[in-house]
Amino acid sequence: MIASNRGPVSFTLSEDGALTMRRGGGGLVSGLSEVARDSDLLWVCAALSDGDRSAVRLAPGGRLDGAGYDTGPLRMLEIAPAVFHRAYNAVANSTLWFVSHLLYNSPFTPHFDGRFQREWESYQDYNGAFALALAEEAGHEARVMIQDYHLSLTPAMLRVERPDLRIAHFSHTPWAPPEYFSVLPDEVAVEILEGLLGADHAGFLTARWADAFVSCCEVILGARVDRDRRNVTYQDRTTRIGVHALGVDGPALRARAAEPDVESHLQVIKEQVGDRRLIVRIDRTELSKNIVRGMAAYREFLAAHPEWHGKVVHLAFAYPSRHDLPEYREYTAAVQRCAKEIEDEYGTDDWDPLILHMEDDYPRSLAAYRLADVLLVNPIRDGMNLVAKEGPILSPRCALVLSREAGAAAELGADALLVNPFDVSGTATALHDALVMPEDERTNRATRLRAAATALPPQLWFADQLRALA
Ligand code: F6P
């Protein structure tokens, strides 16, 4: 079984009451959807929207597959909207996400008061609802793979209900070092660590995040840790810690990127860009993705290199995300402002130096990857970042400018141009270096990047975790 907040599909409700099903997005969902397809894994997720809630009410026991939808085995949990809002928006996204991504230069100003206490109780209830549903659905000694920071208490809760199960938890985000994790109220920090240690196996995307978790267990819980074997012993139970670097299914991605909808976007972009060089970025409009500093770096590059005026275009895709949160709405506005300033300063009648798209369009993103000369991926901190892996798979000559704080840097660092995400001038220099990189060097690097990016595609990544759990 798999458990995650966001599931493989979501529903929208039109005014006439009709429900339309769409595939879900994001790294976790795209990785796991490939695994779940054609398997008998039951996926338990939350109903996120009004459309989802309507679909659940029409499905016996919340089983969407039982209601005739082509989803694979899927149960959606209907959680009271106020509880869901506090658990997902207030605790998971406005607190735990900011802590794990070290967003101390963001609007996140840690302040834990009575209101947070109520939000935390909702997070406990939400995690409890998952534990209960999993306990109901799981067969004897079933293996349950619980995903991400939304569900950090569920492993321990589920163990109480069903000690026979084999339980794994996987973190798709970075993990904060103890000095930063400790900004959480003590009892919250302890409960999260104890929650994850309810699992038999706790998985992370890189050794760096796994080691940070182990240090938190040692410093905050006083747990016994074995760094060489990567395990943590606490209250007479041992949890094994695993590192599983999610990669991309290269053949499947290439096949998708050859479809007609991608081809037609390819023509449009070619017409826009002409024979100019192309710098691409593709992100959710997310504070950790560092889009504003990326644009500032492009602006500084244009200021320092007038010889490139009219000869380069920056195509920036910044797709909507988490718009219920004011921080994200403000960040979206900042990205738009920054793009406009660059256009006003450098744009001419026949040259758009920066083209910003903010509507989600997967085929258009795939077309942009195929044409990219340079891919800019500069997050402040990122669990893995699959964009950095997808680009080199689709463009045989793409130079990668990559933040050293992205999990992907552990595998791609040798062939990417690594940057400090806060160093705007350093990023501007890297953009220039990437553009002038000799042709044979860029293709050689791209070949090696592609090999690293496809090393552990989702099916193997998941099989690896199942093996570790066994
Ligand atoms: O761990 C990161 C993650 O859960 C990814 O799946 C995805 O990139 C993102 O967060 C999606 O967030 P949300 O479900 O809030 O849109």
Image (cartoon, rainbow, N blue to C red):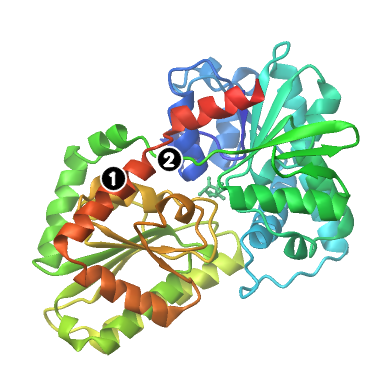
Mark 2: which amino acid? Gly
On screen, residue 381 versus residue 175, left or right, reads: left
Regarding mark 2 in the picture, which secondary structure is present there? Answer: loop
Regarding mark 1 in the picture, which secondary structure is present there? Answer: helix
Q: Which image quadrant: the C terminus? A: top right
Say above or below: 2 vs 85: above
Q: Position of residue 43 (x, y in %)?
A: 58, 26
Residue matched to label 2 = 247
Q: Whole-Å distance between the Cαs marked 1 and 2?
A: 11 Å
Residue 17 is at least partly visible in this image: no
Q: Residue at x 32, y 42 (%)?
A: 451
On screen, residue 296 versus residue 439, left or right, reads: right
Q: Residue at x 26, y 52 (%)?
A: 446
Q: Residue at x 48, y 44 (%)?
A: 27
Q: Which image quadrant: the N terminus? A: top right
Mark 1 in CB contact with mark 2 (< 8 angstroms)? no
- Front position in the image: 452 or 126: 452
On screen, residue 167 versus residue 449, left or right, reads: right
Mark 1: which amino acid? Ile
- Going from the N terminus, do you reach mark 1 or mark 2 first? 2
Residue matched to label 1 = 393
Q: Residue 105's quadrant in the figure?
A: bottom right
Say above or below: 279 vs 206: below
